[in-house]
Image: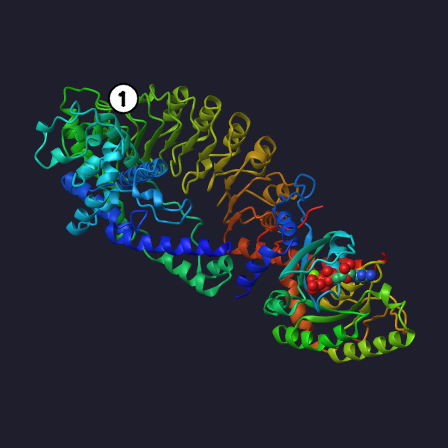
């Protein structure tokens, strides 16, 4: 079923092309004469969901290609991009699945949620109604995949800071409550001004593999919130073993996917 | 406003279509499988129920396809000329333009359709420059006439054949074409060969379990190897393939002579009675050479005597033989008169021969300078001396197998070093020989990069100082099969495990065959490396998430 969704979305979304081209590149990162020790490769899939125009595509494109576009292009179906981060002897590959926020694409939610180790729920800090929609997004995505780590992200922080302080206060408090209920780390970000963008994915990785993150939390109302220490962990104890087990299969030199991932 | 006329047109068109379809069966554009079969049946009966090989069937298909295209083109022309009712079709409609002359139409068989069609297409037929419409009831052979292979009447002397055979299409009476067809048929028929297995059989159930890591698979594999090797069904199948060309001998005189020519290019036998029949038939012909084959293969002639094999020398000339194989024919060597004339020899396969010795290799090496593949498994009498002769005189040698269970002392590192220094060796089998670490080191240094397969089973002198150490330095980067069963002194599998994982990560197949002990050690090392890498990955990720960026 999801296969069918995928093909439908493929034909529609623009950045899919970029992704396939990427996959077709030859695999050249191993210099066999120097050292036959291959790099470890860790692959994590992360889904991005939330209402239309909250900035899901912008965030993904910013993270993968480090560009920001003022103009809005509606996402039709699902976008897919990969980013590889090379750290010492390990390649961390993020596969990001961005689901169009229009209601009509809700039937493709399985593509973004199934197989994802974390699901990022995005809302627009300047539009309160996008936060209340999170309830429904969470209900549906969680229903499909309850082992994925939820992460709650408020976008367009750059516009948010110019708004009425009371609104800001109200918004911050409500989103904290949401985060509590969802047991999801909460992060306010700005794709336009590059605030907290990298941290979203570091928090995701830390939560997925139960790593200890030491970045300073930010919990002053009005600041770009970054609250993660006590969130996204309650359920973790029960899932911890699962994740370690999964990571065992993920963290191998044989990549699970049929196509090789990025090379530097 | 713009859409209405289009729609109207469409509906008009559809109406027309409907009536036309009634007049002429136009629904299908391409022959259905059953129709092709029917066509084949026709041919088959034409040629005296001779079984048609698949290549011929392909030719058939192609013919009908070509014809199909042509008639389509013609119809297009007609439409452009406006000479028939076709012109009324709107251009670019999806109307299924089945060609009038399509060979498949005739197969519909119904007289009703035939008469209808002839009526309705009368006009078309007259205006068509290449029309053959009026000869709708011709046999299939006329379809082939489009290929313009027939020089009317000059070929195909029908008197030669019985009534039925006279209906055989002319192309089957043209020697050159027939030879081509039969050559394709002969490609299908396999020269008998040793069944190649993807990997060696496990030595025990436990071993199978180690290899397959899955109880079900392991049990099946172990079961298979306790069963007997040859299953009846396979033998039957082989027999069938064989008879394909053989049958062609009996179609008619032309077929016989052409088929014989093709058959005699590759001479191979696996049934002693076929062999003796062949000898009987041709050795009588006042010692005349009948063929210069490129392949000569005898498969498992356990009882063959030298005398019988020597008779072959009076029938076949060896000058073109590039592949000479006496597979498990323990008591014979190639006829003496052949040896000095094996200039084209590239592949000499003689496993299990009890009679060949170094002298034989001296003779061979003096003549067969193009030798590439040499298989002397279980030829116990061969020693270093013979191998050195080969190494010195056959510089193109790529593959050499000297593996054995007896007389292992006859082959030492001397052979390995000679081969490494003087040949293009890529595949080396020295199972059960007295190879030392020094020999393997020499091989690694001379040929390491080129070595693809290495069989070292039961080489009891090898220690951790050769294979394991060499792999640490990646001396054999292109190795894809390594056999290291029963090497009692090898215990350090770390680097082999690393090599294997490295290959896996690059999706390059690698097979390391060990005995139970070695396989287990290898697995343990692999697991250890994987664990270590996991820990490392966690470390790296931890480092990254806490690194200050932005
Ligand atoms: N100022 C500002 N604008 C942003 C930010 N993030 C996104 N935008 C703008 O918001 C609009 C919508 O962004 P998209 O990323 O296309 O929204 P989306 O969630 O992918 O929308 P759908 O594909 O319809 O679901 C675009 O015009 C972006 O330029 C931000 O952090 N700050
Ligand atoms: Mg989008």
**Vertical order, B262 against B522 (above or below):** above
Is any part of residue A117 visible from this angle? yes
Position of residue B454 in the picture relative to residue A9 (left or right): left
Image quarter for ligand 1 equals bottom right
Position of residue B50 in the picture relative to residue B471 (left or right): left
Residue where numbered disc 1 is placed: B317
Residue at left 17%, top 30%?
A: B256
Closer-to-camera residue (B64/B484): B64
Query: Chain under label 1?
Result: B
Residue at left 33%, top 57%?
A: B227
Disc 1 Cβ-to-ligand 2 distance below 8 Å: no
Residue A137 placement: quadrant: bottom right
User: Residue B326: x, y in percent?
Assistant: 31, 34
Residue at left 40%, top 48%?
A: B93
User: Residue B266: x, y in percent?
Assistant: 29, 31
Question: Is the C terminus of chain B in the top left, top right, bottom left or bottom right quadrant?
Answer: bottom right
Is any part of residue B308 visible from this angle? no
Residue B340 placement: quadrant: top left
Closer-to-camera residue (A202/A14): A14
Q: How many marks?
A: 1
The chosen color scheme is: rainbow
Callout 1 environment at 10 Å: few (<14), some (14 to 19), or many (20+)?
many
Closer-to-camera residue (B401/A78): A78
Residue B54 placement: quadrant: top left
**Vertical order, B297 against A174 (above or below):** above
User: Residue B10: x, y in percent?
Assistant: 41, 54
Q: Helix, strand or loop at disc 1?
A: loop
User: Residue B396: x, y in percent?
Assistant: 48, 26
């Amino acid at each position: 079923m999801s296969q069918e969704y995928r093909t439908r979305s493929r034909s529609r979304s623009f950045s899919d092309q970029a992704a396939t081209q990427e996959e077709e590149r030859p695999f050249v990162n191993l210099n066999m004469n120097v050292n036959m020790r291959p790099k470890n490769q860790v692959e994590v899939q992360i889904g991005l969901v939330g209402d239309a125009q909250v900035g899901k595509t912008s965030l993904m494109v910013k993270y993968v290609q480090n560009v920001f576009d003022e103009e809005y292009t509606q996402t039709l179906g699902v976008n897919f991009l990969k980013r590889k981060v090379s750290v010492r002897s390990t390649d961390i590959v993020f596969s990001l699945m961005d689901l169009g926020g229009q209601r009509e694409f809700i039937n493709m939610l399985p593509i973004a949620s199934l197989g994802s180790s974390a699901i990022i729920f995005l809302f627009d800090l300047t539009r309160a109604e996008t936060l209340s929609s999170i309830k429904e997004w969470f209900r549906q995505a969680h229903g499909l995949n309850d082992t994925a780590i939820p992460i709650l992200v408020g976008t367009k922080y750059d516009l948010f800071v110019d708004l009425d302080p009371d609104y800001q206060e109200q918004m911050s408090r409500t989103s904290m409550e949401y985060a509590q209920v969802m047991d999801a780390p909460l992060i306010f970000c700005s794709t336009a001004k590059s605030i907290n963008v990298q941290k979203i994915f570091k928090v995701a990785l830390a939560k997925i593999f139960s790593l200890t993150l030491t970045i300073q939390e930010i919990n002053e109302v009005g600041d770009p919130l970054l609250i993660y220490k006590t969130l996204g962990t309650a359920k973790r104890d029960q899932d911890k073993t699962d994740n370690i087990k999964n990571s065992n299969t993920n963290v191998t030199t044989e990549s699970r996917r049929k196509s090789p991932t990025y090379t530097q | 406003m713009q859409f209405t006329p289009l729609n109207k047109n469409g509906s008009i068109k559809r109406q027309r279509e409907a009536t036309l379809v009634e007049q002429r069966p136009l629904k299908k554009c391409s022959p259905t499988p059953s129709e092709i079969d029917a066509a084949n049946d026709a041919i088959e009966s034409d040629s005296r129920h001779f079984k048609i090989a698949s290549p011929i069937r392909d030719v058939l298909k192609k013919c009908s396809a070509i014809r199909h295209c042509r008639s389509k083109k013609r119809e297009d022309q007609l439409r452009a000329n406006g000479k028939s009712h076709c012109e009324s079709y709107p251009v670019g409609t999806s109307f299924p333009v089945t060609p009038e002359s399509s060979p498949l139409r005739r197969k519909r068989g119904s007289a009703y359709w035939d008469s209808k069609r002839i009526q309705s297409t009368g006009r078309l037929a007259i205006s068509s420059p290449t029309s053959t419409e009026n000869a709708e009831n011709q046999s299939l052979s006329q379809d082939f006439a489009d290929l313009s292979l027939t020089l009317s009447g000059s070929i195909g002397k029908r008197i030669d054949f019985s009534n039925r055979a006279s209906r055989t299409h002319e192309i089957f009476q043209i020697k050159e074409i027939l030879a081509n067809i039969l050559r394709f048929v002969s490609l299908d028929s396999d020269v008998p060969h040793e069944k190649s297995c993807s990997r060696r059989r496990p030595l025990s159930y436990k071993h199978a379990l180690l290899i397959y890591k899955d109880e079900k698979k392991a049990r099946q594999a172990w079961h298979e190897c306790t069963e007997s090797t040859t299953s009846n069904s396979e033998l039957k199948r082989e027999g069938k393939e064989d008879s394909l060309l053989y049958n062609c001998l009996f179609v008619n005189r032309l077929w016989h002579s052409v088929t014989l020519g093709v058959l005699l290019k590759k001479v191979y036998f696996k049934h002693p009675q076929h062999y003796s029949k062949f000898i009987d038939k041709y050795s009588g012909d006042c010692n005349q050479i009948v063929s210069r084959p490129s392949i000569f293969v005898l498969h498992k002639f356990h009882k063959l005597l030298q005398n019988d094999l020597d008779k072959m020398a009076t029938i076949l000339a060896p000058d073109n033989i590039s592949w000479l194989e006496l597979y498990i024919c323990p008591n014979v060597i190639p006829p003496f008169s052949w040896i000095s004339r094996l200039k084209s020899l590239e592949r000499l396969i003689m496993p299990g021969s009890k009679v060949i010795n170094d002298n034989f290799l001296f003779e061979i090496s003096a003549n067969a300078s193009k030798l590439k593949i040499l298989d002397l498994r279980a030829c116990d009498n061969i020693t270093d001396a013979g191998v050195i002769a080969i190494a010195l005189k056959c510089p193109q040698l790529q593959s050499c197998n000297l593996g054995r269970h007896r007389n292992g002392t006859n082959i030492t590192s001397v052979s390995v070093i000679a081969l490494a220094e003087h040949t293009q060796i890529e595949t080396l089998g020295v199972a059960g020989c007295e190879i030392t670490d020094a020999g393997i080191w020499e091989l690694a240094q001379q040929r390491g990069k080129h070595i693809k397969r290495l069989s070292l089973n039961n080489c009891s002198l090898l220690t951790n100082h050769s294979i394991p150490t060499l792999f640490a330095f990646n001396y054999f980067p292109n190795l894809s099969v390594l056999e290291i069963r029963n090497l009692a002194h090898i215990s350090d599998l770390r680097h082999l495990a690393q090599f294997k994982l490295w290959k896996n990560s690059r999706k390059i197949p690698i097979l390391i065959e060990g005995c139970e002990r070695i396989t287990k050690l290898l697995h343990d090392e692999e697991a250890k490396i994987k664990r270590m890498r996991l820990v490392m990955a966690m470390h790296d990720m931890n480092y990254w998430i806490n690194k200050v960026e932005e």
